[in-house]
Image (tube, coloured by chain):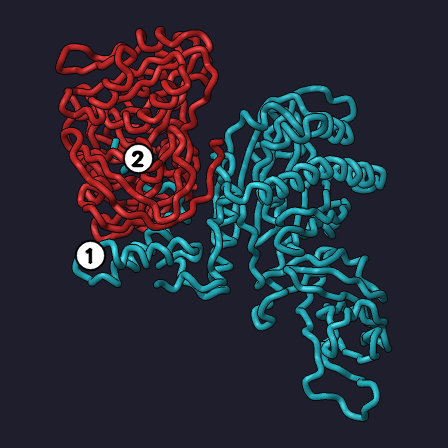
C-alpha cells in the first residue's frame, strides 16, 4: 500500500552508530512502540535540530535488526546539506529521538518476470531491503550499484555476500561507470527498474527509459530533489508584484527563503513532485537547475515556471552559458 | 510543552483528508427565503440545532432549537402571536430575541429564562445565520450573490443535503477538471484537464481562472448557446472563473462564446454567461447543506429555460453527490491515510489555508509561532527532545524542546518538509 500515510510520532532510542563508509554512518534505532516491520522501500521521518531550529528529515529504512524490532538507517554527511545529516552524525548511543512509523512512498511490486535495482551513491539505502526481499522470494533480479569510488559505498560487503553474481558494481574511478542505455536494455520485458540516486542519474535513466519506448509505470524511483545538475549556489529571487527580494543561501531552498521574507507560499510535498509550489518565471539571469520531477523535460527546457521547493538558480558561468560570468544568479518570479 | 496542545487546536493539517473544521464567526445560508415563513423549520448549522420562523412583520428569526427548561426542541412547538414561539412541551414562550415571555404555573418569569437568538440576515434569496460571536456579526460580511435577485439575471436552484464535510464540496468546486470524469455526458470536455489555469488569492478570496479556446462545446453549453444563437454549430471559447469567498461560498462565472469573438478580452456579446452560485453550510463535521442556483444572462423571460437549467444542473450535481459521499466514506474507512495533494488542488489548498487561519483566529492561537495544527506530535516531541538533546545550543534545554516541538508542528502543516536532507 502506498497511499499517503498519516504520520504517527513516537520515541526511539539510538542503539548503535558506526561508520560504514566514508562519511556514511549506520544508525540503529529502537522505537519505543514497535510497529509492523518496515516494508522494502519505506522511510521514517525524524525530528532534527538544525542551525538553531527544529526540523524534520526523512531517511530510508535499510532494514530491520535485533529481533526485527530495530530500524537500520544509513546517513551520509552531505557537505551541501541543510544540516540534517550533521545532526544525524552527531547522534550517540542511548540518545532519544522522535520518529514516525515507517512510511511507504516507494513500494516493491512482486510477481514480475525480472527486476533491476539501480542505486547511485547513498541512494543504495532505499534499495538494500528490496534486494533482500527479491532474493528471499527467489525473484530474477540484478542489483546495480554505482558510485564515484569504492570507499564511498555503504553496505558494500553485505551486498556482495548477499547477492554474489547478481550484484553489478559500477565504480567511476575504477573505470566502470554506469551506462544507462545498457541498464535499461537489461530490464526484461514486463520487468521493473527501481532507481534511487542523484538527480542527474535519475534524469539520464528516465530519458533512456522513454527513448527505449518502455512503459513509464515500470520505471520506479524515489526522489528527494536534493541534487541537481549543479552544486547549490546562493542566488537572488525577486517578486516584482509584491516588491520582495531576498537572497537564497546555498543551503536554503527558494521556498524557505520566500517564506522567510514574508511571501505567502503554497506547497505540499516539498520534494519536487506535487506541483503545488509552482511559480511563474518572469526573468532569469543565470541558469535554472530544476531538480523536480513534476514538469516534463520540455517544460524544463522552456523554463517559464519552476517548483520553488527544489529548483535553484546558478550563475551563467556555472551553468555553462557562452561568455557567462560568475555573478550570482537572479530570478524574477510571480506567485499565486 | 507548547501552547499548541490545547484540545481545541489538536487537529490535522489543513491539506489532508480528515480536515473538517469550520469557523463559527461566519454567515451560513440556513435556508432559502421561501422556506422560512409562518411555520417552524428545524435545521442544524455548525452542529447547532436551530429553529427558523418568520414574524408576521416578515422578519426571519433563528433561535436555538432547545427549550431553556429541559431542552425539548422548540421546533415541535408552535407560533404564538405576531412574533413568538411556544415550546410544545410545557408552553414556555420566547420572543425573537430568545427571551421568555410566558412561564407555566407561575406569575413571574425566571430572570435567566432565554434561548440563544442567532444573528440573521435575509439576502440574495437566502436566510443567513451567524453561529459564532453575535458581536462580530456584520451584515456586510454576507457573501455577495447578487445574481440570485438581479434583473439582468434569471435562475433558480435547490438545496442538497450531502453526507460529506462541506470542505469536500469546496474542493470539488475549486477544481473543475473533475467535470471531464464525473460529468462526461453533459459539461465534461477533454480540454478541462488539458488546459492551464491560474490561481490568485487575497485574505478572504481565491480565484481560479481557466480558458479553453476554440473547442467543440460540450452538449450542455451547445444548447445554451443555441438559445441565443439558434443553429450555431461552430467552435467556442469557454471560460470558468471560480471565485471563492471564505469560508464556503463559491460563485463560478461560466460560459461560452463563438470562438474568436473577443470573449477573453471581455466582449461576451457573442456568447452566453451563467453564474453557478454555491454556498455550503456545515451541518455537522461530516454533513452539510449545499444551496446552489444557476443564474443566466440570456433569454431572461423564458421560464422553460430556467426550469431546464435547474433540473439539468440538479442532475449534474447528483453525480457529484454520489462521488462526494463515497469520498467521505473513503476518508472515514482509511483513518491512517492522508491526501496526496496535486497541482490541480491549488485552489482548494488556498481555501483550506484561509479557513484554517479563520479558525486559528477564533481559537486565539498564534499560527505564526507554532501553527494550530501542531497536535500530539508536538507534545510528544517536546518531551522527547527535552531528554534527548542534552546540549542546548545556548538557550537552554527547555527552549530547545519547544523549538523542536514547533518544528514538528510546522512539519505537520508542511508534510515531508526536509526530504532534501535525506542523505542524497
The residue at 45%/66% (across/down) is: B364
Work out how far the residue at label 1 is from the one at label 2, CA to CA, in angstroms: 27 Å
Q: Is residue B421 visible?
A: yes
Chain letter matching colour cyan: B
Q: Residue furthest bottom?
A: B107
Label 1: which secondary element: loop
The residue at 70%/47% (across/down) is: B162
Q: Residue A196: x, y in percent?
A: 32, 24
Q: Which marked residue is nearer to the observer: mark 1 or mark 2?
A: 2
Tell me what hue chain A is rendered in. red
Q: Along the line of sight, which residue is nearer the eye, B254 or A64?
A: A64
Identify the residue under disc 2. Answer: A65
Question: Residue B352 vs residue A236: left or right?
Answer: right
Q: Residue B306: x, y in percent?
A: 80, 41
**Number of dots carrying numbers:** 2
Q: Residue A174: x, y in percent?
A: 13, 13
Identify the residue under disc 1. Answer: B390
Q: Residues within 10 Å of mark 1 (few under 14, many from 20)?
A: few
Quadrant occupied by the N terminus of chain B: bottom left
Label 2: which secondary element: strand
Amino acid at each position: 500500500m502506498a497511499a499517503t500515510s498519516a504520520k504517527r510520532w513516537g520515541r526511539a532510542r539510538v542503539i548503535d552508530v558506526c561508520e560504514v563508509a566514508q562519511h556514511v554512518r549506520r544508525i540503529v534505532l529502537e522505537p519505543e512502540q514497535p510497529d509492523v516491520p518496515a516494508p522494502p522501500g519505506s522511510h521514517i521521518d525524524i525530528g532534527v535540530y538544525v542551525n538553531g531550529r527544529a526540523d524534520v528529515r526523512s531517511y530510508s529504512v535499510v532494514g530491520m535488526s535485533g529481533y526485527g524490532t530495530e530500524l537500520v538507517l544509513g546517513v551520509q554527511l552531505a557537505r551541501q546539506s541543510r544540516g540534517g545529516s550533521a545532526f544525524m552524525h552527531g547522534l550517540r548511543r542511548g540518545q532519544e529521538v522522535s520518529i514516525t512509523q515507517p512510511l511507504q512512498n516507494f513500494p516493491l511490486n512482486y510477481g514480475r518476470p525480472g527486476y533491476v535495482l539501480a542505486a547511485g551513491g547513498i541512494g543504495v539505502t532505499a534499495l538494500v531491503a528490496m534486494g533482500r526481499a527479491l532474493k528471499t522470494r527467489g525473484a530474477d533480479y540484478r542489483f546495480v550499484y554505482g558510485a564515484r569510488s569504492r570507499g564511498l559505498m555503504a553496505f558494500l560487503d553485505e551486498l556482495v555476500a548477499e547477492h554474489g553474481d547478481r550484484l553489478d558494481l559500477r565504480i567511476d574511478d575504477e573505470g566502470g561507470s554506469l551506462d544507462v542505455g545498457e541498464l535499461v536494455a537489461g530490464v526484461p520485458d514486463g520487468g521493473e527498474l527501481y532507481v534511487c540516486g542523484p538527480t542527474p542519474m535519475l534524469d539520464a535513466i528516465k530519458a533512456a527509459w522513454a527513448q527505449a519506448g518502455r512503459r513509464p509505470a515500470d520505471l520506479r524511483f524515489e526522489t528527494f530533489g536534493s541534487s541537481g545538475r549543479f552544486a547549490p549556489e546562493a542566488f537572488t529571487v525577486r517578486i516584482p508584484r509584491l516588491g520582495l527580494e531576498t537572497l537564497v543561501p546555498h543551503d536554503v531552498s527558494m521556498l524557505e527563503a520566500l517564506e522567510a521574507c514574508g511571501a505567502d507560499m503554497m506547497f505540499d510535498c516539498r520534494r519536487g513532485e506535487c506541483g503545488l509550489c509552482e511559480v511563474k518565471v518572469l526573468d532569469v539571469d543565470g541558469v535554472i537547475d530544476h531538480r523536480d520531477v513534476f514538469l516534463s523535460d520540455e517544460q524544463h527546457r522552456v523554463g517559464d515556471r519552476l517548483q520553488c521547493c527544489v529548483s535553484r538558480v546558478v550563475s551563467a558561468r556555472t551553468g555553462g552559458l557562452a561568455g557567462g560570468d560568475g555573478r550570482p544568479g537572479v530570478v524574477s518570479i510571480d506567485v499565486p | 510543552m507548547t501552547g499548541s496542545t490545547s484540545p481545541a487546536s489538536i487537529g490535522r493539517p489543513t491539506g489532508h483528508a480528515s480536515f473538517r473544521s469550520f469557523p463559527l464567526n461566519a454567515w451560513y445560508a440556513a435556508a432559502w427565503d421561501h422556506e422560512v415563513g409562518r411555520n417552524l423549520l428545524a435545521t442544524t448549522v455548525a452542529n447547532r440545532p436551530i429553529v427558523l420562523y418568520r414574524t408576521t412583520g416578515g422578519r426571519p428569526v433563528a433561535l436555538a432549537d432547545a427549550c431553556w427548561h429541559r431542552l425539548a426542541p422548540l421546533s415541535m412547538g408552535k407560533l404564538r402571536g405576531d412574533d413568538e414561539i411556544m415550546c410544545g412541551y410545557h408552553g414556555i414562550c420566547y420572543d425573537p430575541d430568545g427571551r421568555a415571555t410566558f412561564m407555566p404555573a407561575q406569575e413571574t418569569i425566571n430572570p435567566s429564562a432565554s434561548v440563544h437568538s442567532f444573528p440573521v440576515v435575509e439576502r440574495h434569496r437566502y436566510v443567513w445565520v451567524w453561529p459564532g460571536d453575535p458581536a462580530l456579526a456584520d451584515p456586510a460580511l454576507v457573501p455577495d450573490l447578487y445574481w440570485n435577485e438581479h434583473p439582468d439575471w434569471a435562475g433558480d436552484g435547490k438545496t442538497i443535503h450531502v453526507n460529506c464535510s462541506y470542505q469536500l464540496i469546496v474542493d470539488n468546486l475549486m477544481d473543475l477538471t473533475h467535470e471531464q470524469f464525473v460529468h462526461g455526458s453533459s459539461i465534461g470536455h477533454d480540454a478541462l484537464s488539458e488546459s492551464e489555469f491560474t490561481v490568485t488569492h487575497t485574505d478572504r478570496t481565491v480565484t481560479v481562472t481557466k480558458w479553453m479556446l476554440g473547442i467543440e462545446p460540450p452538449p450542455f453549453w451547445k444548447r445554451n448557446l443555441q438559445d441565443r444563437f439558434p443553429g450555431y454549430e461552430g467552435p467556442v471559447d469557454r471560460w470558468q472563473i471560480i471565485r471563492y469567498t471564505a469560508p464556503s461560498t463559491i460563485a463560478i462565472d461560466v460560459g461560452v462564446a463563438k470562438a474568436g469573438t473577443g470573449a477573453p478580452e471581455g466582449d461576451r456579446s457573442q456568447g452566453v454567461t451563467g453564474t453557478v452560485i454555491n454556498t455550503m453550510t456545515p451541518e455537522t463535521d461530516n454533513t452539510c447543506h449545499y444551496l446552489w442556483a444557476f443564474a443566466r444572462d440570456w433569454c431572461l423571460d423564458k421560464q422553460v429555460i430556467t426550469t431546464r437549467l435547474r433540473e439539468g444542473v440538479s442532475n449534474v450535481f447528483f453525480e457529484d453527490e454520489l462521488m462526494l459521499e463515497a469520498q467521505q466514506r473513503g476518508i472515514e474507512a482509511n483513518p491512517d491515510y492522508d491526501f496526496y495533494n496535486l497541482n490541480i488542488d491549488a485552489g482548494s489548498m488556498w481555501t483550506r489555508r484561509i479557513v484554517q487561519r479563520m479558525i486559528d483566529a477564533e481559537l486565539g492561537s498564534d499560527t505564526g509561532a507554532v501553527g494550530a495544527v501542531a497536535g500530539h506530535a508536538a507534545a510528544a516531541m517536546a518531551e522527547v527532545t527535552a531528554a534527548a538533546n542534552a546540549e542546548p545550543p545556548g538557550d537552554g534545554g527547555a527552549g530547545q524542546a519547544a523549538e523542536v516541538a514547533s518544528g514538528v508542528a510546522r512539519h505537520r502543516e508542511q508534510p515531508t518538509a526536509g526530504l532534501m536532507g535525506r542523505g542524497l
